[in-house]
Image (cartoon, rainbow, N blue to C red):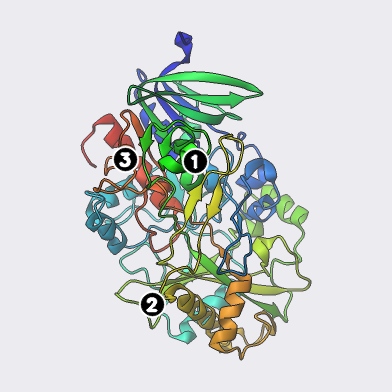
Amino acid sequence: MPDPAQRYDYIIIGAGSAGCVLANRLSENPATKVLLLEAGPRDWHPFIHMPAGLAKLVGQKGVNWNYDTAPEPQLDHRMLWWPRGKVLGGSSSINAMCYIRGVPGDYDDWASQGAADWDWANVLPYFKRSEGNRRGGDALHGGDGPLTVSDLRYTNPLSHVFVAAGRETGFAQNGDFNGPQQQGVGFYQVTQRDGARCSAAVAYLDPAKPRPNLHIRTGALARRILIENGRAVGAVFGHEGRETEVRAEREVLLSGGAINSPQLLMLSGIGPAAELREHGIDVAVDAPGVGANLQDHLDICTLQHSTQPVSYDRVSDAVIAFNYYLRGRRGPGSSNIAEAGGFVRSRYAPDERADVQFHFVPAMLDDHGRRRLSGDGYTLHACFLRPRSRGRIRLNGADPATKARIEANYLSDAEGFDLKMMVECAKLSREIFAQKAFDPYRGTPIFPARSDLSDAELADFVRAKAETVYHPIGTCRMGGDDASVVDPQLRVRGVEGLRVVDASVMPNLIGGNTNAPTIMIAERAADLIRGLPAS
């Protein structure tokens, strides 16, 4: 019989963006006992909280799962690096902090595909509940939510050049990508508070930590969900070489993200039966959809040398950090690096929504910044927002410490449309860099090395250089059909007392960055779990 001290009302597995929200909302009732399990450490590292420190987090293995995909057939069989946060706050503690929600049509699409009540009218109140926008609240924004959203305190001169070049290309300037109109170029609002990163851990977990009914365990790797008589009753986790069993009186809530959530379901016997048996796992529920429907935004970077030393390439990290903390969290240390960007409709867009997103970086960013280039330069990320290719998460073994196999299957759609769109992304990037605004700064091209490439050559460039822009979703798809992994209340089909609450439940990618929508999902899930009326 488990120790009574090991019993909780709710067990939350994963203290990423969604898990932090759930921990806060479910522990608001002092009579509700909540356990939050996180495989990574506390978010103590100073580079997490200094926004520009994200560039240094690339090499911090202690806060990053450091995933790699399987060899990608359509990308020269390269294994792509997938950084994901392994720390309190999850990927919200290591991302570029761009606050983007997508557009109403994205969520209306979810509802039309069986995610009942996840249309724009129903999700907007939860975006507003979470958002504390320093510009104030209005019909589309929240002004007093826990997640602080701010304008950047510091922006590099090259970021302003990019916005000017975007206008010269014919794109409107947009001061609010989450306003009435998403399209245009401009500066991102960011999840920062007073010049520091406002991760989900800062926004939601820090205020809840003093509550005696909330228990947080870091360094706790979930090994399996306990299922008895068709009901999730607890979990087993490893900590410092020991296994501990904990029990949930109400529900187990899985918030591991698009990779870890399907992996833990499969390790617990919920997944494709043949695959589970292959690894010696007893089948509790034959659920072929677990791990399927993997989607991500593939990104192509165009790099150019700068003739003027104004980029972030040669700035001293020590000087940035010293000035940041000495001067009240201001200066380049408060930059999210990807300061400016935009959303545009390509000539292939099937509807009124933007289908290409830009992130401009006033530095040379090759291989996620892991390969440093000499001199000064600038980078334009461009991604196709609605890819048709689908991948899968599979098991590499029955040991929870063994990383899952990621088969992203980029550019695998039968029509070849995704590749055509990535070529278009590269063309649009070159067009922007060719505008007069860049004349005083334009040096030699780096990637691609020539500006006269044919479409076939650009396709080869994409295959050789494209990378993730860090938005994996969909592997525990929400829907109204029996093939979906969770129903519109996020309950796992075939098991009582178990929900998945994270980006893995998204049926399709939204048109933009995925952190804000993940937080919204958790806000709405907290109401569903507590049986509260919709906001």
Please say if 488 is above or below 114. above
Q: Nearer the viewer, mark 2 or mark 3?
A: 3
How far is the residue under mark 1 from the one under mark 3?
Answer: 17 Å
Q: Which mark is residue 263?
A: 1
Displayed quadrant of residue 295: bottom left
Pick whichever, 477 or 433, lies toward us: 477
Query: Which residue corresponds to the image point at 56% horizontal and 35% vertical from the top-left?
Result: 398
Please say if 446 is above or below 84. below
Q: Residues within 10 Å of mark 1 (few under 14, many from 20)?
A: many
The number of numbered discs placed on residues in the rendered structure image is: 3
Secondary element at image label 2? loop
Q: Inspect this view and state whether residue 452 appears.
A: yes
How far is the residue under mark 1 from the one under mark 2?
Answer: 36 Å
Q: Quadrant of the C terminus?
A: top left
User: Which amino acid type corresponds to the residue marked 1 in the rendered image?
Assistant: Gln
Query: Which residue corresponds to the image point at 38% horizontal and 39% vertical from the top-left?
Result: 500
How far is the residue under mark 2 from the one under mark 3?
Answer: 33 Å
